[in-house]
Image (tube, rainbow, N blue to C red):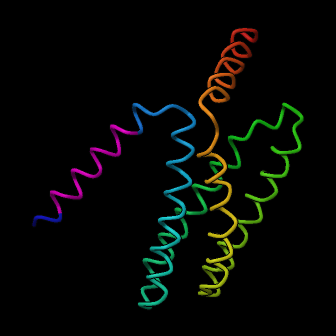
Amino acid sequence: MALKGINAYKKGNLKHEVASADPHKLTLMLMQGALDRLAYGKGCIERKDFEGKAEHLSRVSAIIMNLRDTLDLESGSDVGENLFALYDYMIQRVTDANVQNDLNIMDEVINLLLPIKSAWASIPDEAKQEAYEAQRQKRQAVV
């Protein structure tokens, strides 16, 4: 009974965090969510809870697809194109891990995603502000 209250509190807190987060924070939250779901999926495989594994890995794929599909590929940056290809690869590997129940493949995806999350977290505030301002100006020019 107490767990239901705790889970409801967590969901409410998460909704508040999402509502008040900037795009940079949302991206970090998505990356952390994918890493958490990968860890849960690994636990499910170890316990032979294949239904739970499928649910968690499905969410991982959805999160990584969201990360991939929100990349700015119009800027012509190699970084965006390379990240797109890497996210695509991760999605395929998550599918492989799901089909094969392979913990090593899941570790591979974790080891690919962790450095991206770390790099994203280390972006200086000044650079974030410059990016937000450039996006704002870009949107205003379109309107």
Q: Position of residue 21 (x, y in %)?
A: 45, 34
Q: Position of residue 44 (x, y in %)?
A: 44, 82
Residue depicted at 54% across the width and 60% down the height: 34
Q: Nearer the viewer, residue 96 or 32?
A: 32
Is residue 2 within the magenta segment?
no
State the quadrant of the N terminus: bottom left
Relative to 119, residue 143 above or below: above
Relative to 27, residue 58 above or below: below
Is residue 16 within the magenta segment?
yes
Q: Position of residue 126 (x, y in %)?
A: 63, 26
Residue depicted at 67% across the width and 50% down the height: 119
Residue depicted at 75% across the width and 12% down the height: 142
> Is 118 left or right of 21, judged from the image as shown?
right
What segment is highlighted magenta in the picture?
A: 4-17
Relative to 90, residue 29 above or below: above
Residue depicted at 65% across the width and 85% down the height: 104
State whether the magenta stretch is mostly helix, strand or loop: helix
Q: Nearer the viewer, residue 51 or 64?
A: 64
Q: Where, by quadrant of the figure, is residue 97 drawn?
A: bottom right
State the quadrant of the C terminus: top right
Q: Position of residue 60 (x, y in %)?
A: 56, 63
Q: How many marks?
A: 0
Q: Where, by quadrant of the figure, is residue 128 drawn?
A: top right
